Image (spheres, coloured by chain):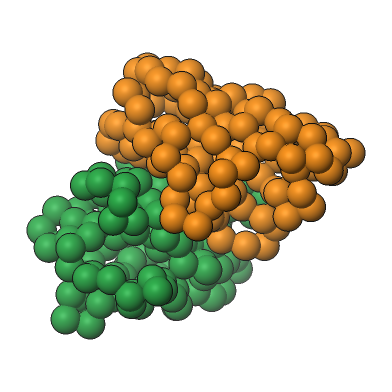
Amino acid sequence: DIQMTQSPSSLSASVGDSVTITCRASRGINIYLAWFQQRPGRAPKSLIYATSRLQSGVPSKFSGGGSGTDFTLTISSLQPEDFATYYCQQYNSYPPTFGGGTKVEIK
Amino acid sequence: EVQLLESGGGLVQPGGSLRLSCAASGFTFSNYAMSWVRQAPGKGLEWVSGISGSGGNTYYADSLQGRFTISRDNSKNTVSLQMNSLRAEDTAVYYCATPAPQSGNYDWAWGYWGQGTLVTVSS
């Protein structure tokens, strides 16, 4: 199985800040990486697929990049509703696997 | 609007069984694979099982050791997960998920998620 490693596991930021989360795959996954946002007590919400493509209705403040084994999610101008846990997930190889999550907290 | 609505969760004793269902609407159900993803309390996301649009192919996480069975009824737009020999470590919120059309023909590129149903395995 492909292991997905996210860093950091948590971070603190202020409203208006920009943050970047990193996701590393244990072997190459081409561009087949997705990002999800999960607010406490809620279901995951799809943000990005194919590394950098926004799901319908997702604001452009979310951006993704990378290829191969190293990927990033950048959130610009953090707002209160952006404070949540973010997960990466690869779908290049079976079985699909998730990173451990990055909790973005308010400083 | 795509909607996925899970049901069937609850409290069950170790060794017991439970059947989860997910009712789908807002898209051509038979065209898309469906998956179950779970989340243990305070933990991350874990893919559990998937089934192709036709139902002809099924997939399971190795950790399940043959205890779960996924199925679908394309006439009723539902997917089910039969869970047997349940263990404490199966305690989790179970989500059903499906790809969004724009994600391409990738069964595991989930664009839509249900709200989840809680399964608690405890005596």
Residue A56: name its quadrant.
Answer: bottom left
For image coordinates 22% across by 82% down, the residue present is B76
**Is residue A34 visible in the rendered structure shown here?**
yes
Residue A29: name its quadrant.
Answer: top left
For image coordinates 53% across by 52% down, the residue present is A58
Q: Is residue B102 left or right of residue B4?
A: left
Image spot of residue B101 (x, y percent): 28, 56
Location of the C terminus of chain B (image quadrant): bottom right
Residue placed furthest toward the right: A107
Q: Is residue B65 above or below residue B31?
A: above
Image spot of residue B29 (x, y percent): 23, 70
Residue A27: name its quadrant.
Answer: top left
Residue placed furthest toward the bottom: B76
Image spot of residue A5 (x, y percent): 54, 25
For image coordinates 40% across by 20% down, the residue present is A67
Residue placed furthest toward the front: A60
**Is residue A99 visible in the rendered structure shown here?**
no
Total marks placed: 0
Chain that the image shows in orange: A
* Chain B image colour: green
Image spot of residue B59 (x, y percent): 24, 49
For image coordinates 22% across by 70% down, the residue present is B28
Location of the N terminus of chain B (image quadrant): bottom left
Nearer to us in this view, A100 or B104: B104
Q: Is residue B85 above or below residue A47?
A: below
Nearer to us in this view, A16 or A90: A16
Q: Is residue B110 above or below residue B84?
A: above
Nearer to us in this view, B48 or B77: B77
